[in-house]
């Protein structure tokens, strides 16, 4: 690991100032991804800015018809939240399926979404549940956020402050879990809203995405049968040592049908 200067600010104004003053700074949330990256010397920031002491980035609350989850809220807190479970049980279930207990108690929703790992679970929730990503500068719609492999719409130095989720009528998350890491080989979030169904797939492509044909079929008829005969194009999916693109395309359909079957 290369040497860096460690900062532990207590408010966002301080974070913004450190970001502006430093040569090559990085925000530190749970460190579950960032610290191994530093240890492997895949990144060598000049400064690490630890967000742990910024109180208003922590916690979960209800705001009118939405649930707001602070960026520094760890996965275990989302999984255990009675508020989240009452509002959208699928979101709590998804958080409870991430990694292992150590990862769930350190990893944060803001870190996961900012990192945009193609196999991470939260991107399926953010996209499938039509969340808003709040930053220190603006609000970004889920549909505009995940742009490519580990790429997002965040500008350099932009800080995620919270995730804002609307309440679906029904939702369900199903994943085919990598047996070692827990990451999604494929994960599917299906959510029914007034007049439309959203379906988001993670793990299968360079970034989470919404297959239009599947959503249209489910909006017409919210049944597992409505997805019969449809398929995803393997040419647009990832192929790696864990699964081929064709396998991922098949599993995504199976999981989508399973998710719909559980709540239809
Ligand atoms: C063994 C293991 C198993 C895992 N299994 C799973 C799994 O099954 N499913 C899954 O989804 N994930 C999994 N993860 C990932 C984990 O859940 C974390 O979500 C992920 O590592 C990032 O969150 P973090 O809080 O640790 O972020 P960090 O590692 O601290 O940061 C990650 C990146 O996000 C940036 N960042 C952090 N916070 C912000 C912010 N508020 N605004 C802007 N940028 C920010 C950082 O600068 C950094 O670039 C696993 C990780 C490990 C180590």
Image: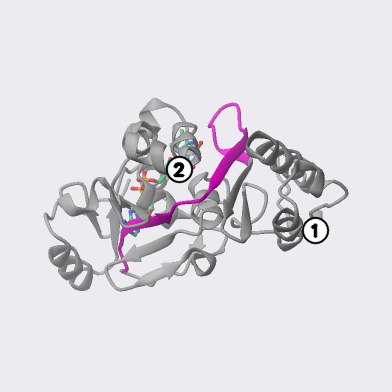
Q: Residue pushed farthest front?
A: 194
**With 258 as the anchor, is 183 left or right in this view?**
left
Q: Secondary structure at mark 2?
A: loop
- From the image, tell me which residue sits under label 2: 88
In front of the other: label 1 or label 2? 2
The residue at the point 85 percent across, 46 percent down is 228
Locate the C terminus and report the quarter of the image it occupies: top right
Q: Is residue 5 above or below residue 134?
A: above
Q: Residue pushed farthest right?
A: 229
Q: Is residue 77 visible?
A: no
Q: Is residue 235 above or below residue 36?
A: below
Q: Horizontal and vertical percent for residue 229?
A: 88, 49
In which quarter of the view is residue 161 placed? bottom left
Q: Secondary structure at mark 1?
A: helix
Q: Horizontal and vertical percent for residue 216?
A: 73, 61
| Figure label count | 2
The verdict on residue 177 being magenta is yes
Q: Horizontal and vertical percent for residue 27?
A: 29, 56
Give the magenta part as a residue range. 158-185
- From the image, tell me which residue sits under label 1: 235
Dominant secondary structure, magenta: strand
Residue closer to the observer: 90 or 2: 90
Mark before the other along the chain sequence, 1 or 2: 2
The residue at the point 34 percent across, 64 percent down is 134
- The circle drawn on residue 28 is none
Asked if ligand 1 lies within 8 A of label 2, the reply is: no
The residue at the point 33 percent across, 43 percent down is 31
The residue at the point 54 percent across, 32 percent down is 182
Marks 1 and 2, Cα distance to the nearest angstrom?
33 Å
């Amino acid at each position: 690991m290369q040497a860096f200067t460690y900062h532990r600010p207590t408010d966002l104004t301080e974070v913004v100032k450190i970001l502006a003053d430093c040569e090559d700074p990085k925000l530190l949330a749970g460190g579950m991804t960032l610290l191994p990256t530093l240890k492997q010397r895949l990144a060598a920031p000049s400064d690490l800015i630890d967000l742990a002491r910024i109180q208003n980035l922590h916690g979960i609350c209800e705001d009118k018809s939405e649930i707001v989850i602070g960026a520094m809220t760890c996965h275990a807190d989302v999984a255990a939240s009675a508020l989240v479970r009452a509002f959208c049980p699928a979101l709590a279930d998804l958080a409870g399926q991430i990694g292992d207990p150590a990862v769930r108690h350190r990893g944060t929703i803001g870190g996961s979404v900012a990192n945009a790992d193609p196999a991470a679970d939260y991107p399926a929730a953010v996209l499938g549940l039509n969340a808003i990503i709040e930053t220190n500068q603006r609000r970004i719609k889920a549909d505009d956020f995940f742009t490519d492999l580990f790429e997002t719409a965040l500008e350099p130095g932009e800080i995620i402050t919270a995730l804002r989720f609307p309440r679906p009528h029904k939702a369900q998350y199903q994943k085919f879990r990598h047996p070692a890491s827990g990451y999604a080989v494929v994960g599917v979030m299906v959510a029914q809203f007034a007049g439309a169904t959203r379906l988001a797939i993670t793990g299968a492509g360079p970034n989470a995405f919404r297959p239009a044909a599947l959503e249209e079929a489910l909006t017409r008829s919210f049944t597992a049968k409505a997805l019969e005969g449809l398929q995803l194009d393997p040419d647009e999916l990832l192929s790696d040592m864990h699964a081929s693109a064709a396998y991922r395309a098949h599993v995504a359909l199976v999981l989508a049908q399973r998710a719909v079957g559980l709540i239809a």
